[in-house]
Image (cartoon, rainbow, N blue to C red):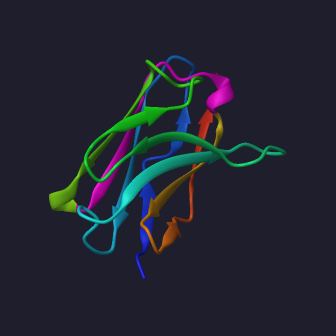
Amino acid sequence: QVHLVESGGGLVQPGGSLRLSCAASEIISSSYHMGWYRQAPGNQREPVAFITSGGITNYADSVKGRFSISRDNAKNTVYLQMNSLKPEDTAVYYCNAVSVTHNYWGQGTQVTVSS
């Protein structure tokens, strides 16, 4: 069982930045692809960014050029750097770890973009 703990959420003004972290309870480097998802009130959970075990990244069109996903396998941690934040980025952000046989989720961290 892999436990994922997100942190770094909060309240930020439009145009501001936040960095989310996702700490995994065990080694994730060789087996797991990692992703960030978000869910706004009344909406379905949607993918935001993804990074494979080999470091290949992919982003939702809505965040391309503003968000950056990275991973530090030595620290079992995945990051989401969010710049130029917009009110429509407001959501609960969830970390996801997926392998061939398992799929794990964190508890989520709230990001609110408001003036």
Q: As rendered, which of 98 and 48 lies closer to the eye?
A: 98
Number of numbered callouts drawn: 0
Using residue 3 as the reference point, say whether residue 31 is left or right of it: left
Residue 96, image x and y in percent?
49, 58
From the viewer's perspective, tell me whether residue 67 is left or right of residue 48: left
Residue extending furthest bottom? Answer: 1
The answer to which of 15 and 24 lies nearer the viewer is 24
Point out the residue furthest to the right here: 42
Q: Residue furthest left?
A: 74
- Magenta-colored stretch includes residue 32: no
**In the depicted structure, whether residue 69 falls above or below residue 44:** above
Residue 38 vs residue 77: left or right? right
Name the spot of residue 46 as percent of width and height, x first.
66, 43
Q: Is residue 7 above or below residue 9?
A: below
The range drawn in magenta is: 76-89
Residue at image point 48% right, 18% down? 84
Write the residue at 51% across / 65% down.
106
Residue 38 image-quadrant placement: top right
Q: Quadrant of residue 50?
A: top left
Which residue is painted at 56% across and 65% down in the image? Answer: 107
Taking depth in this image into account, of 56 and 76 the one nearest to the observer is: 56
For the C terminus, the quadrant is: top right
Residue at (42, 82) in percent of width and height: 1
Q: Position of residue 91 (x, y in %)?
A: 66, 42
Q: Nearer the viewer, residue 87 or 102?
A: 102
Q: Position of residue 104 (x, y in %)?
A: 50, 69
